[in-house]
Amino acid sequence: MLRPIQRALRHPARLLTTRSAQPSAAAWAPWLAGAAAASLLAALTRRPVLLESLASAVPPSVGGVGRPVTAKEIQQHNHAKDAWVVIGGVVYDVTEFLEMHPGGEEVVLPHLGKDISPIFHLLHAKNVLSRTLEDSESLTVVGHLAPGAILEVVESPSSSAAVEERRRNLPPVESIRNCAQFEQHAKEVLGADQREWHFFSSFADDGHSFNANKRSWSYLRFFPRINVPVRSISTATTFLGDPTSIPLPIFYCATGQTTSGHPDGELNLARGSAVTRIPQMVSTLSGISIEEIGEERELLAKNGGSKAPLWWQLYIYTDRKESERRMRDAVKAGVQAIFITVDAPQIGNREADAKPPSSTLMEANLHWRTIKDQAPNMPVLVKGVGCVEDVVLAKQHGADGVLLSNHGTCYGDAGVIHATEILQREVTSGMKLLGVRNLGELKPEMVELLDGLLGRRM
């Protein structure tokens, strides 16, 4: 019943709308197959992509916020020691907040004295302003943009007309045969010379770890078993003691600021997960709040979608109260496991991405005893383990699992469902050629590690 939904989602351009052109039921009629599919599709298209820029005009709801401020006055507050910006018609003094900005003050400085509404709303969860005003004295409201004021607006490159045109001209997603082609299309849409692409594709320093990660697959050789009946096999598994059957041994891993690549960011992954039943992990630095994602999942489930496990990746902040607040929000949103990132006490030197997220807010003095205390009553895993000694320590200190990684890189996302189908075909084909009928039959002796994969310690 959900196959028509998948076909609709394979054509991203068909999901792009504007405020003046909302999708009608008749327009979607060819894609629907039954009431359940229709309900789910209505949920999937509930939040349209807004293609037009946000205007500087003061919304009626903020007209009474403080005093009216002229464009000329705002423009005078354009340096680090006296910094104002306009967001949604409200004028904010961000002078004291600059050094606390998670992305670093460098990303804000060029836009001081301007209206940053489009780029702000693209990169931030909708409740971030209210939360920051509530929890911090470093961000203050000056007033509202005076009626008729004309102020320079900072557009978001990833929502520009050129990007949207390239997105509309993407080939049908069915034409993509492997995951590497997704990367190429993302590069074409975002622009090879744009920071958004550099953020998703860049690596630290000279990229030795990044390239070694890719090369490592060429050092593996399989020993298949023959004469095993493999006409019918199962790729299903379970995670973290949850009896829910997952169709593939994969999950959608956390990536920060996905709204840099598409305005709906993590909501696209949530919608894909509702079809594929693959677990989704959400980043602390996601462009969509965990509350919004939780609401989206509930709506999708009510309209016939699957409710796959939801996990959360946590950066522990130097401000532990902030970490605790975020944890409460995640639990309330329905998160079922926490992955604590431990391999980023310092953000790597990503040369292609000239303005990487700031590490000044991240706790550099982590200790094993703090791990399990972060999330009582649910599985806690350690993300970023790179040696066997730390796997043992993680177990000794109560972690429920580890994620082996070296924070190598991250890619943009597109075509969640089709990418999952590609992986489904690859895993199924590999298992049949190896002569195994389920994941339990995979054995270490089926894999040979060739010379060059494993190094020696000094």
Image (cartoon, grey):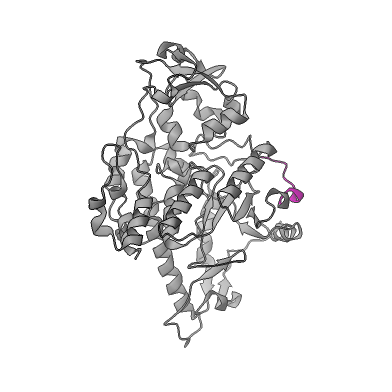
Residue 364 located within the stretch drawn in magenta: yes
Give residue 342's position: percent from left, percent from top.
Answer: 66, 48
In the image, 89: left or right of 51?
right
Front residue (pair 243, 176): 243
In the image, 422: left or right of 363?
left
Give residue 166's position: percent from left, percent from top.
Answer: 29, 43
Who's the residue at 54% across and 34% down the image?
Answer: 103
Residue 389 located within the stretch drawn in magenta: no
Who's the residue at 44% across and 73% down the image?
Answer: 428
Q: Is residue 318 among what the camera can see?
A: no
Who's the residue at 57% across and 40% down the image?
Answer: 349
Main SS of residues in magenta: loop
Q: Is residue 379 among what the camera can see?
A: yes
Residue at the limit of the structure toward the bottom, as seen here: 227
Front residue (pair 187, 129): 129
Q: Is residue 358 above or below residue 141?
A: below
Q: Is residue 441 above or below residue 217?
A: below
In the image, 373: left or right of 262?
right
Give residue 331's position: percent from left, percent from top.
Answer: 60, 49
- Which residues make up the magenta segment? 363-371
Number of disc labels: 0
Q: Is residue 108 above or below residue 173?
A: above
Give residue 121's position: percent from left, percent from top.
Answer: 44, 34
Front residue (pair 26, 166): 26
Who's the residue at 31% across and 45% down the image?
Answer: 16
Which quarter of the rendered picture does the N terminus lie within?
Answer: bottom left
Front residue (pair 53, 422): 53
Which quarter of the rendered picture does the C terminus lie within?
Answer: bottom right
